Image: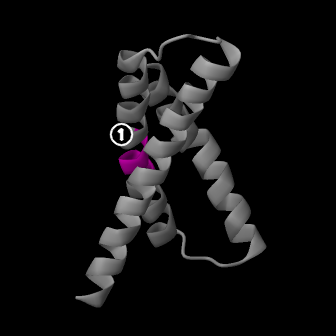
Amino acid sequence: MKSFFRRYQLFIVNIVSASGLLATSDLCVQILYEKRETIDKRRFLAALGTGIVMGIEGHIWYSYIDRVMAQRTWRGVFKKVAIDQTIGAPFYALTYIV
């Protein structure tokens, strides 16, 4: 039961951090770069929603990679990065674009 709560807590943290970072970055662009007088709420909510989806996607993907490749060596790390960049990154890009 304890491991269930740890896993669930990590899931929530991943969603909150991904959506928070994406929404905050959109706010910064709107305020600091575009120098908008008012915030485009629809765009902000779209960034927040995209972050939620990417947080869920990332949690599932990285949990899978860690389970399948449980190696804790430098070689294992490089394999994980290579797999992430060749298989995982295109899906993240599609999520962001769509």
Name the residue: 48% across, 13% down.
Answer: 38
The answer to if 67 sits in the magenta stretch is no
- In this view of the protein, which residue sits in the foreground, 47 or 65? 47
On the image, the x and y values in percent for residue 51 come to: 43, 38
14 vs 68: above or below: above
- In this view of the protein, which residue sits in the foreground, 21 or 31? 31
Name the residue: 36% across, 79% down.
Answer: 6
On the image, the x and y values in percent for residue 17 come to: 48, 52
1 vs 27: above or below: below
In which quadrant of the rendered view does residue 1 lie? bottom left
97 vs 70: above or below: above
On the image, the x and y values in percent for residue 80 come to: 63, 59
- Image quadrant holding the C terminus, namely top left
Name the residue: 40% across, 68% down.
Answer: 10
Name the residue: 67% across, 54% down.
Answer: 81
Task: Tell me the crowding category of disc 1: few under 14, some 14 to 19, or many 20 or more residues within 10 angstroms, Cα based.
Answer: some
- In this view of the protein, which residue sits in the foreground, 4 or 15? 15
Work out which residue is located at the far left of the displayed protein and give it: 1
Q: Is residue 91 left or right of residue 36?
A: left
User: Principal SS element in the magenta part?
Assistant: helix
Label 1 sits on residue:
53
63 vs 36: above or below: below
Work out which residue is located at the far right of the displayed protein and give it: 74
Inspect the image, locate mark 1, and give the three-letter code of the amino acid beneath it.
Val
Q: What range is drawn magenta here?
A: 54-58
Q: Is residue 66 left or right of residue 33?
A: left
On the image, the x and y values in percent for residue 71 come to: 61, 76
